[in-house]
Image (spheres, helix red, strand yellow):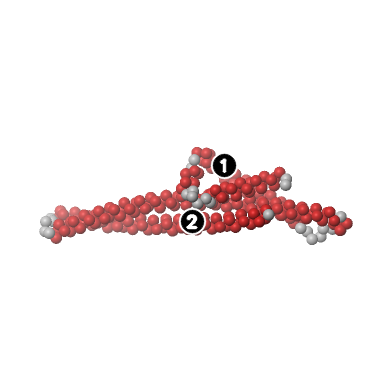
Amino acid sequence: MTLQWTAVALFLYVEIGILVILCLPFISARRWQSIFQLRIWSCVARFWNKVFLTMIIILIVLFLDAVREVRKYSAKDLGTDVKLQPNMFDHLHMKLFRAQRNLYISGFAVFLWLVMKRVVTLINQLASVSGTTAALQAQADCANQAAKKYMEDNEMLKQTLMEGRGDKATAEGMELLRKEVEKLKEGLKTSRDALTNSHLEADVMKKQMEGLAREYDRLLKEHQELQV
């Protein structure tokens, strides 16, 4: 294996290792997000897009070169020299095997590079949705507690009026309180709707992550079979 294909193979192994670490179930998305927010990653993020596009171009060029080699050595008409020299036939098959191996290595490297970028993006989105969901849940709980408190106060005012101890100011205060309760109920409903939407978005992102994990496992299994 030449130097360039050795480097591509090592790059592929590094990609597999990183994706395995990113898919570990006991590391939450919010913890990954806190890791990505470290100062060292903020410095790397400045050049991330350029590095990503550069690696994509290099890997695609190597992939096309491997395709060319496979097409070259898989031609049906190999000439009459093959019959005269049997060793040439084995040599051509060895060349074809190496070209196919390079094709698989470069193809999987391109695919896993794209998958890794997508997984990192989904992890960040999932962490953001989780943080938003937690904040909305806290707001909904506070609004619910406030609504219960105002409803209890409203019941006490009603009892006071029914007992005949209320006056005009108390009635006006009760009317204002009723309006505030209605506003709080509307705010509580809005918070609950937002919380429901956040849960739905989180479920969709979890399903996407599970699909990517299944696809990664399948590709890893195929890669292991090809290595054998």
The x and y percentages for residue 24 are 52, 50
* Nearer to me, 68 or 20: 20
Which one is in front in this view, the residue at disc 1 or the one at disc 2? Answer: 2
Left or right? Give the position of 194 relative to 5: left
* Nearer to me, 168 or 69: 69
Decide if residue 228 is in sight here: yes
Residue lying at the far right of the rendered structure: 84
The x and y percentages for residue 60 are 66, 51
Q: Regarding mark 1 in the picture, which secondary structure is present there? A: helix
Left or right? Give the position of 177 relative to 50: left
Q: Which residue is disc 2 drawn over? A: 206
Query: Residue drawn at (44%, 52%), measured in percent from left and top?
Result: 129
Q: Which residue is disc 1 drawn over? A: 47
Query: Residue drawn at (69%, 49%), measured in percent from left and top?
Result: 62
Q: Amino acid at mark 2?
A: Lys
Q: Amino acid at mark 1?
A: Phe
Query: Residue drawn at (57%, 57%), measured in percent from left and top?
Result: 215
